[in-house]
Image: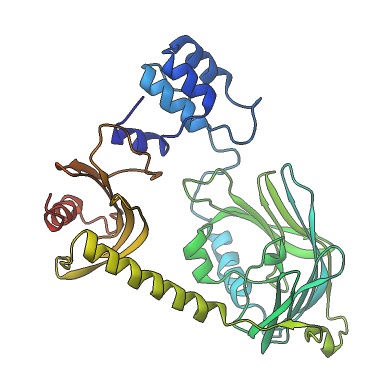
Amino acid sequence: MPRLPEVHVAFASSSLCEVCAELAFAADADALTERAVRGWADEDEDAAPDAVRLVMAWAGHRLPVDPTAEDKAPVLPLTAQDQRVWQRLEPLMVDGPACPVSVQGRIVREERGESPAYTDVVRDGSRIRLSGTRGDPWLVSDGVTTWERWDDTGMVASPYTGEQWYGDGSELACRRSHEDVELFDFGTPIGPIEQVQCLGRDAWSFRFASPPHKPYDMQVVVDAETGLVLDQRFGDFSVSRWTDFRLDEPVADDTFVWDGPVVTRADPGVEGKAEYERLAAEGQRWFETNVTPAPLEVRGKPVSMFLHGSADDGEFQASLSGGVDGLLARRPRSDEWCDLGWSQVTARWSDGTWDWALLVWDHLDDGRTSERVAAVRRWLGG
């Protein structure tokens, strides 16, 4: 079976399902070819298409054609008219209108192969109440305190930190920030931007272009008055939409206050940061004792290390950040392939004791990947 770094680079996987493994070890190239052509639609959800392609490459056969994007439109510049609409529409979607929005209604989220999920919404400015299908609230906020249901033990109280995405389609009750766009993409509008009617309201319909690794554009219908998304679709795979949307109906103030049982827990952010710092310190001590106590700098920037796991035989995986961003792994010297579970490998090398692997995320795109690899190898004595 393949043991080359190119496997990771080309296919982002080196794992094989049992059927592929049996055929591969039997060197049954004809059966592998038939399997690749037939596909895996008749198998369970755990079937791995990349594994089929991996074995096809190993067997020396032509690879199946990559699936094409299912619902993407060409990304063309907006017309002058669409640009004028977008200049008014974008700030309305991000910041909202001058007066706070008061809206009540229901959102349904439908994903292919799953039962619909419903969220009942009551929103008044920064105050919000989200309830599930049975009417049980799972998020309540008065704009000062947020009560959120984590599990069946009760609601957890924490300071209000602004609008957030909570899933089950409830993101349509909130607004996407510029930070969300930077994190998840889907920020480039695709024309035409058309005037439509939705739920009896004036609205705008258009698409957001998907990033290259996503098969669907985001098709949206945006309410012309509030800037809230009334309908959001990723092809027919995932659809979130308001089925009921009502503005400016009276609502009692106690709707946005939770007076039921509250579970007392430490602030998740503070608690998580403390745990991260504890694990980082433990990992650093292990690394200095078992690998090297020497610090590493690349072009004047220090490199920090976070240990993800280690074994008694000295094997480990860790993240690097700073002068080098990426992953580092070591295991005892072996002639067998080691499945790291990485999407790619930048460099592998071995000494008399260890096998090493390094992945450099060269997001800086400054052409200095080889310099970073060489610095890490010198640091580790390789």
> Observer-nearest residue: 282 or 5?
282
Instruction: Identify the residue at the far front of this view.
Output: 312
Of residues 306 and 173, the one drawn nearer to the viewer in this rendering: 306
Looking at the image, residue 379 sits to the left or right of residue 170; the answer is left
User: How is the model colour-coded?
Assistant: rainbow
Residue at (54% x, 57% y) in the render:
186
Query: Visible in this render: residue 64?
Result: no
**At 55% across and 43% down in the image, what residue appears?**
215
Looking at the image, can residue 302 be seen?
yes
Residue 171 position within the rendered picture, expressed as x and y whole percent measured from the top left = 67, 66
Residue visible at 78% across and 87% down? 257
| Residue 236 relative to residue 91: left or right | right
Residue at image x 58%, y 60%?
Answer: 82
Q: Nearer the viewer, residue 335 or 223?
A: 335
Residue 227 on image: x %, y %: 68, 71
For the N terminus, the image quarter is: top left
Q: Position of residue 325 (x, y in %)?
A: 29, 60
In the image, residue 49 sits, relative to residue 197, either above or below, namely above
Q: Is residue 335 left or right of residue 220?
A: left
Report the side of 332 relative to 115 (left or right).
left
How far across and down, in percent of the image, does residue 339 sit?
38, 39
